């Protein structure tokens, strides 16, 4: 099992917390670099969300 698979297993059911962490880390980097690398940070955030399966949903899930 790869490290990424282990991380995905640990995050299962906690996607919202992982999503907040990814956003917070990106905001921190943007703040420290004065948005110099904002587009690269946004791309990295999106790729990480895609990889971990913690993408935000545009619409709430149906019961």
Image (tube, rainbow, N blue to C red):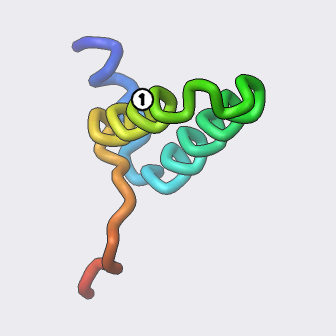
Q: Residue furthest bottom?
A: 63
Q: Residue furthest top?
A: 2
In the rendered view, tell whether residue 3 sits above or below residue 53.
above
Instruction: Look at 55% across and 34% down and name the residue there.
Output: 38
Q: How many marks?
A: 1
Q: Quadrant of the C terminus?
A: bottom left
Instruction: Look at 65% across and 42% down and name the residue there.
Output: 24
Q: Position of residue 16 (x, y in %)?
A: 49, 56
Q: Residues within 10 Å of mark 1 (few under 14, many from 20)?
A: some
In the rendered view, tell whether residue 13 sits above or below residue 1.
below
Q: Position of residue 12 (x, y in %)?
A: 37, 45
Residue sitting nearer the eye, 54 or 23:
23
Residue identified by numbered label 1: 44
In the rendered view, tell whether residue 61 sits above or below residue 23.
below
Q: Is residue 39 left or right of residue 34?
A: left
Residue sitting nearer the eye, 4 or 49:
49
Residue sitting nearer the eye, 8 or 19:
19
SS of the residue under disc 1: helix
Q: Kindly indicate the quadrant of the structure image that contains residue 28.
A: top right
Residue sitting nearer the eye, 30 or 63:
30
Instruction: Look at 74% across and 30% down and name the residue there.
Output: 34
Instruction: Look at 71% across and 24% down and name the residue there.
Output: 33
Q: Position of residue 5 (x, y in %)?
A: 28, 24
Q: Kindly indicate the quadrant of the structure image that contains residue 30.
A: top right
Q: Quadrant of the N terminus?
A: top left
Q: Kindly indicate the quadrant of the structure image that contains residue 48.
A: top left
Q: Is residue 42 left or right of residue 30?
A: left
């Amino acid at each position: 099992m790869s490290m990424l698979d282990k991380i995905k297993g640990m995050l299962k059911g906690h996607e919202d917390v992982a999503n907040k962490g990814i956003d917070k880390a990106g905001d921190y980097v943007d703040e420290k670099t004065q948005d110099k690398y904002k587009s690269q940070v946004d791309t990295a955030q999106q790729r990480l969300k895609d990889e971990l399966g913690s993408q935000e949903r545009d619409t709430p899930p149906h019961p």
